[in-house]
Amino acid sequence: MVDIGTLSLIILLAMFALLAIGMPLGFASAFLAVVTLALKFPPDLLFGTFGRGPLSVLGQAVYRQMTNYVLISVPLFIFMAAMLERSGIARDMYSSLNVWLSQVRGGIAIVTSIMAVIMAAMSGIIGGEVVLLGLIALPQMLRLGYDRNLAIGTICASGSLGTMIPPSIVLIFYGLVTETSIKALFTASFLPGFMLASFFLIYIVVRTQLNPSLAPLPAPVPGEPRGSEKGLMFLGFLSRFTLWLAGVLMVRALFFTVTGENTIREGLDPIPLGMVSDIPWIAGTFVLALVLIFFVVGRERTSRGWAMGKGLIAPIVVIGVVLGSIYGGITGITEAAGMGVVAVFAIGLLRREMTFDIVWDSLIRTLKSTGTIIWVTIGAAALAAAYTLVGGPTYVANLIVGADMPTMGIILVMMVVFLIMGMFMDWVGIVLLIMPVFLPIVVRLPAEEIGFLGSVDARYIPIWFGVVFCMNMQVSFLSPPFGPAAFYLKSVAPPEISLTDIFRGFLPFIALQLLALAVLLAWPPIVTIFL
């Protein structure tokens, strides 16, 4: 029988060896799960009684993971992202954003980042975003003479924001494995996700202002509004959208009032923007939008602004359906994903763009992506169960805690492990293999010693650690040698752009991601502000 220290080393080295020879992570994990049990338990205990013993524990762990209801949301979000990519919704969104920022230095790179944030808030899928941005934005930036490294880095770094910004599939898996509230994880990741996106935008603006040759301005289009005229049109667009939104909210609030559903009851949360006390505020917003349209902007400017910006409406509706149904208390995560699919499909039908070929292709791509994730989940769940059964987590916990390091020293060691593993392994495997070992250790650490500029409430430690983990996975999507964002972009990039060029363009953005990670570690309250 092999001792647990030697067994841990064997598993680690064997995992890297199997991945190096090209074995898929799911199969490598499942194989090592059986090897782990074979090295620790005698054959008669493993195979002597069917349905009992260590092997049955593996089967129960996999069954428990695969029958979790929230897991259904993963293929639904992937299906939604696939339909968004194939339909014209994303293309029109890019065109509308480009209209407003075309004459701003670095405007197309800024538009690309903003579009990535909106797409991340719609589906939370990383690969599809990078491919779509590579198809839409990269040719335009290269045509206008943008610096190649800036264009590549902007597309891949922004396209990976789906890891941090809800509804993130990485957060969903973390919540499933650690039994942490996914809604709380979504709430906690909002500010860090948008902080990282703002880092990208600030970097683009500052870099292009300091060196204008990196982002030449396109030639002005004859008749295109400029300056204050464009600003008034944008205000008209916002006013008209606000008018429609306030009207819908008013009808909703009046319906709840007539039916008596918005009365205050003990033990029930008030309906967001649906209580009687909300009606004056909604009515005031409606009147303000009318005043802006008729007395400030003008109806003609408002109509032109609406025509220029209407490509943003469909994405906003999808985001409202998905996140609004979650935070409004209407549905859970899985049902919200289903509603998002229905919303994208309905919008595609209204725009006469949703064909049978698009739906079929989206279903096939969903099947392939989900199949990959499921096999990794099965293998990693089996290995995690086997390693837990032989006492691995306890051994690692004692090893780390017994090293007599300060609290933040232990956490920094974990961050290094995440970053190194992220260079070679898919995030699904890291969640399922590493998190059951690391999270119990972090929970046992003194909460008041976590962070340098503040501490985190002990009950929020699993949520904070989940957001920190996702920030690590942001880095892993760009990290050589196996940064998946590079290979996604290479699949649609011009032949003259090599993988070396792509990884070179990542370097400034990896530094920004590490800066964002440092903020989360130094100031943990940024994660728990909205909790």
Image (spheres, rainbow, N blue to C red):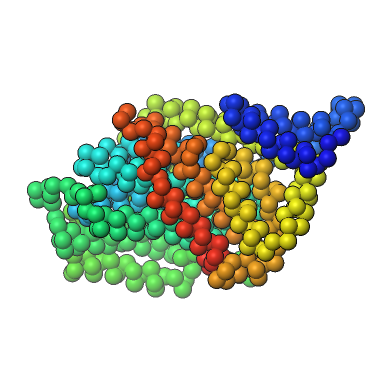
Quarter in which the C terminus is drawn: bottom right
Residue closer to the observer: 122 or 307: 122
Residue 137: percent from left, percent from top: 30, 41
Q: Is residue 120 above or below residue 491?
A: below
Residue closer to the observer: 2 or 242: 2
Q: Is 142 situated left or right of 89 in this image?
A: left
Q: Is residue 3 above or below residue 105?
A: above
Residue 50: percent from left, percent from top: 86, 27
Q: Is residue 517 above or below residue 502?
A: below
Q: Is residue 74 visible?
A: no
Q: Is residue 396 above or below residue 457?
A: above
Residue 526: percent from left, percent from top: 52, 65
Q: Which residue is farthest left?
A: 222
Q: How many marks?
A: 0
Q: Is residue 429 visible?
A: yes
Residue 61 lies in quadrant: top right
Residue drawn at 43 percent across, 55 percent down: 512
Residue drawn at 83 percent across, 36 percent down: 2
Residue drawn at 67 percent across, 64 percent down: 406
Quarter in which the N terminus is drawn: top right
Q: Is 359 situated left or right of 90 in this image?
A: right
Q: Is 475 situated left or right of 53 in this image?
A: left
Residue 182: percent from left, percent from top: 59, 53
Q: Is 454 situated left or right of 145 in this image?
A: right
Residue 57 lies in quadrant: top right
Residue drawn at 68 percent across, 38 percent down: 12
